[in-house]
Image: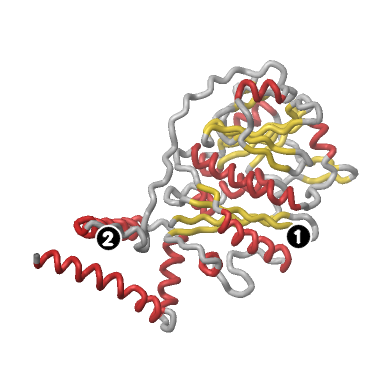
Amino acid sequence: MVRLLAIISFLLLFKFSLPVVDKQLENTDIKKTIDTVQSEISGKDNPALSDTLTSFYEKIQQLADQLGFQVDELPFTKQEPQQPKEVEKVELTPPMDQVFSINNIELGNLKEDIDHNIGKANRSSLNEYGTKWYTYHEDYHDYFMVMYDDTNKAAGLYTNQDLIASTNGIKMGSSKKDVRSKLGEPLTKIQKGLTVYQLQENSDYDMFLLKGTYVTIFYDKHEDNTLTAMQLIRKDFEEKKTDFYTKANSALKEGFEYQLFDLTNAARVKHQLPILTWDEHVRGTAQKHSTDMAVNNYFDHTNLKGESPFDRMKKDDISFYLAGENLAYGQFSSIFAHEGLMNSLGHRENILRKDYEFLGVGVAFNNESQPYYTENFFAK
C-alpha cells in the first residue's frame, strides 16, 4: 500500500509540475540552453541520450501500467518506424537494343508493356523536360522512374537501386575507373539551343552520349567512387531542352518536391532503413524557407531573422524530439539535387538517419528559375 501511494504521488507530481517548468523556462536563460541541446540532438547522433530518454519513458510506462492507464502524451514518446521488408531480387538480363537497361526496360519500350509487366506507376509528376516521371516501386524496393514520349514509348529512365544491366558488364557498384575504361572519356560540354554549356570537371557524375542516348552515371564518393545511380535520356529529349534551367511553374515545383521525397526513400531502402512518411505540415515549413531564400537571395539554414530550422519548425507548431534539415541550390533537377546531397557527408547522414520518421520537401525558384530545395526531417 505504501508503494502504491508513492507511485501515485510520483506520477501526480510529474504531471502537474510540467506546465510550471515550461512556464518558467519561457522567462529564463535556461531556455537558450534547452534550444542548444535540442539542436545538438537534432543535428548529431546521440545514442546515449536517446537510450536514456527511451529507458526513462519505459520506466514511467511500467509504473503507469500498474495503475491501469497509459502515458502516451509524455515527451519523447517514440514510435516504432516501419521496417523494410524483404523483396525477391529482380533477375536482370542484358539489353537487346541499347547499351543499358533498367529493371529489364530499355528506351523505346511501350508504356503498355511496362505497366503490364511491372504494374501501374505509383506516382507521376512533372520533370524538367516538360513531361512526367512515372515512378514505379514496391514500398520503395525495385525503385525506378520512366519518362514517356507522345507515343508512350520510354524516352528516359532512372534508378538508384540494383536494377542496372548492360552489354559491357557495367552495373551497380562498378568503379569509376571501370566505367571509363569501357565507355571512354565522359563529355566535357553539352549544347542547349545555341548555347554550349561546359560540364563540371572532377564532379561526382559522368555523362556519355551512346547510341543516341545521354547516359549519366552517378558515383558514390563515400563508397570508393562506385556507380550508385544511372539516368538515361533520349538524345532528342535532351537537346530540345534548350535552357539549362526549365522555366519555373507550380507543377514543376510540386514535381521536384515529390521526386526528392521518393528518391530519399529509395536511398533509405537501398541501405536497409525504414521509409519515411510524407508530412504536409512540415512541407509548408520547408516551402516557406525555400521561398525566403529564393526571394531574398541567400542560402543558409539560418534565415534572415536569425531563426534556425528548429525555430521555424517550433514556430509552425511541429512537435519533434529529433529533427534535421538538408538544403540544395542550383541543381537543375531533383535527381541531381539528391545525388549531390548523398555525396555531402552531413546531408547524407540526415538522409540515412535511422530514427527519422517524417519528411517534408519544399522547393522554390528565383527569377532565373534556379531551384532552392529544403528537406525537413523529424521524429516525434
Residue shown at 34% from the left, 63% from the top:
74
The quarter of the displayed image where residue 312 is located: bottom right
Please identify, in this view, whether the residue under mark 1 or under mark 2 is nearer the observer.
2
Cα separation, mark 1 vs mark 2, equals 47 Å
Residue 144 placement (x, y as % from top left): 61, 33
Q: Is residue 277 left or right of residue 25?
A: right
Residue 162 visible, this angle = yes
Residue 153 placement (x, y as % from top left): 76, 26
Instruction: Tell which circle, 1 or 2, labels the residue nearer the N-terminal end.
Output: 2
In the rendered view, would you say 133 is above or below 10? above
The amino acid marked with disc number 1 is Asn
Crowding at mark 1 (Cα within 10 Å: few <14, some 14-19, many 20+): some
Q: Which residue is mark 2?
A: 56
Q: Quadrant of the C terminus?
A: bottom left
Residue shown at 69% from the left, 37% from the top:
133
Q: Which residue is outermost to the bottom?
A: 27
Q: Is residue 353 left or right of residue 72?
A: right
The disc placed on residue 346 is: none
Under circle 1, the secondary element is loop
The disc placed on residue 366 is: 1
The amino acid marked with disc number 2 is Phe
Residue 230 visible, this angle = no
- Number of on-image labels: 2
Residue shown at 59% from the left, 50% from the top:
341
Q: Quadrant of the N terminus?
A: bottom left
Residue 237 placement (x, y as % from top left): 80, 35
The quarter of the displayed image where residue 125 is located: top right
Under circle 2, the secondary element is helix
